[in-house]
Amino acid sequence: MMRAICSSLLACGVFLGASAAATAEEWAPKMFETRDHDFGTVARGAKVEYDFVITNLYEEDVHIASVRSSCGCTKASLTSQDLKTYEKAAVVAQFDTHKFLGSHSATVTVTFDRPFYAEVQLHVKGYIRSDVVLDPGGVDFGTLDAGTPAERSVTVDYAGRDDWQITGVKSNSPYVTAKVVEQRRSAGNVSYALDVALSDDAPTGYLNGQLTVLTNDRRASEFFVDVVGRVASEVTVSPKSLFFGTVQPGEKVTKKLVVKGKNPFRIVRVDSDADGFTAETSNEAKRVHLVPITFDASDGSGRVSANLRIVTDLGENASPDFIAHAHVARPLTQSATEANTSSAALTSSR
């Protein structure tokens, strides 16, 4: 009887331990915008990447110990291993379209070791065509100054049917247009020039677009071409994410923002889409401005977030955005139990 009771208690203990471990790891998946991605049908030699974006929702610093892929068809890397509150990073999953053909899938495991140990699994899949080859593997505009138009060309080679044709190209960005021009056709081999243009009114920031190339092939009627680049503003702001920490109700906290330009400029004003954030500016034209940003925790409690814009006299493309965050502490009348609760998820909804 005693042995049976001990066995039951042991089993119960194992179950409760497993449940606690599962609960402890729930904080990590909440930081990902998505955990699954389908690359679709892509050409051989195409540059195919996807960014799984991570945002630190917590007061503690988050550290990513490692990423690993279950398949050689997919390479995984990190843009940053350390994230402070509200900072973003990405797990970059890159499909190998040179060594692999056909249908492939992979699981990317992301391991965290701070503030607690956790693992998150990401999933990618896609189909790599053997009859279509891109050179280069995608459209990369590089870094361009705002207001600068650009053009790039990709060669699309096909081997197979004599009557194969590209019938059209669709872009998922209003700032990217594309057209195809047939270069040659001989005994089942066809070559096209895919000419891609970026308009001069493209907004500042990173460009992560995609072209859908349409064909008359009923079995594989389309394939995708990635379009990347960066439109650089004349004016930059640092840091892009300004965290004021935990602020007591009624307290005011000031942080300084560095705003730089290639040429002297004036800051006209600082706009915010939320109350509580104000800025001090001068009318002096200079290349570097130190702008005090103040947060006033006069009302409410919990997480406060705002998008702010530095409006300059150089126009729309030289008015950078940044994000400001703060956590307003609960009133001091909270219970001792609440006061002693772990802050692991203080800035996240549970």
Image: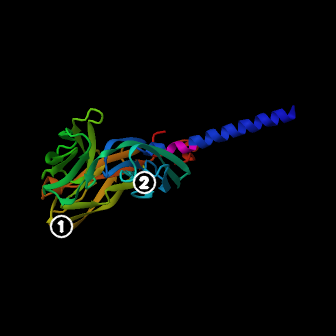
Q: Is residue 34 visible?
A: no
Q: Secondary structure at mark 2?
A: strand
Q: Quadrant of residue 32?
A: top left
Image height of 334 relative to 152, above or below: above
Q: Which residues are magenta?
A: 24-28
Q: Quadrant of residue 283?
A: bottom left
Q: How many marks?
A: 2
Q: Residue 4 at x, y = what percent?
A: 83, 33
Q: Nearer the viewer, residue 215 or 26?
A: 215
Mark 1 residue type: Lys
User: Horizontal placement of 203 versus 294: left or right?
Assistant: left
Q: Is residue 181 visible?
A: yes
Q: Residue 94 at x, y = what percent?
A: 38, 52
User: Horizontal placement of 2 versus 10: left or right?
Assistant: right
Residue shown at 43% from the left, 53% from the top:
76
Q: Which residue is mark 2?
A: 75
Image height of 254 relative to 124, above or below: below
